[in-house]
Image (cartoon, grey):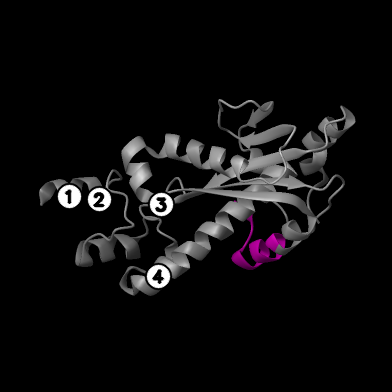
Amino acid sequence: MTDPKLYQYEQDLYDKGIHLIAGVDEAGRGPLAGPVVAAAVILKKGATFTYVDDSKKLTEKQRDLALIEIKKQALAIGIGIASVEEIDLINIYRAAREAMLSAIGQLKIKPEFLLIDAMPMEIDIPYLSLIKGDALSVSIAAASIVAKTTRDAYMLEMDKIFPEYGFKQHKGYGTKQHLEAIERYGITPIHRKTYEPIKSMLKKK
């Protein structure tokens, strides 16, 4: 079962009469390839879960099961994506924030309050930014799972287009296998040119 402590921030807001709470998180700041994906999730009041937790603590199978739970218990889900081009143009921090704002904007219900994973926002909705929020709030944990599974699904599609890079295994992170593939085959259009070691490799050419 999901840790009861994860429901505390939501319960405190419910007690104040705030019911439409959106958890917001992103996935994919660290990889060398692929977009950064954000999600915003408004859960039904009183929703309880078996698998929902910080997405980094869950296996791929558990995340898939958690996603099924979230889709059943969510009032609204929004997804925002910042492309590799955007990341290279405005930097990953700003791209992640833009993806989060886009995810909030995609919600079909306007939230009364936002619980955001460690990101200050310029937005007309009251919010609380929580460091390691996906380990503190069930709404942020749900958003982290939606963002992670959405991004992973995209990287599996990219694996079909660029099979020699092993995106299916590492999802774009800088593993030994991935770095060796970049050395051997060069970069693809979904690689981040402002990230090391790709940045230095491009300078050598």
Residue 61 is one of the magenta-drawn residues: yes
Mark 2 in CB contact with mark 4 (< 8 angstroms): no
Sooner in the amino-acid sequence: mark 4 or mark 1: 4
Where's the N terminus, which quadrant? bottom right
Direction from residue 114 to residue 191 in the image, left or right: left
Residue bearing mark 1: 202
From the top left corner, tell me how far across and down residue 179 is, in percent: 29, 59
Q: How far apart are labels 3 and 2 at the CA level?
A: 12 Å
- On whether residue 58 falls in the magenta region, the answer is yes
Q: Where is residue 184? Give x, y as percent.
A: 20, 67
| Residue highlighted by disc 4 | 159
Sequence-wise first label, 4 or 3? 3
Q: Residues within 10 Å of mark 2 (few under 14, many from 20)?
A: some
Do callouts 2 and 1 mark residues in contact (Cβ within 8 Å)? yes
Residue 112, placed above or below residue 65: above
Left-right relation of 74 to 144: right
Q: Residue 149: x and y, percent?
A: 58, 60
Q: Using a 10 Å C-alpha cutoff, classify the residue at mark 4 as few (fewer than 14 neighbours), some (14 to 19) or many (20 or more).
A: some
Q: Which residues are magenta?
A: 56-67
Residue at 33%, 70% (x, y): give it.
162
Snapshot quadrant of residue 23:
top right
Q: Which mark is residue 31?
A: 3
Residue indicated by mark 2: 198
Task: Name the residue type under label 2.
Answer: Ile
Mark 1 closeness class: few <14, some 14–19, many ≥20 residues within 10 Å:
few
Q: CA distance from mark 4 to mark 1?
A: 23 Å
Q: Which residue is found at the position 33% from the left and 68% from the top?
A: 165
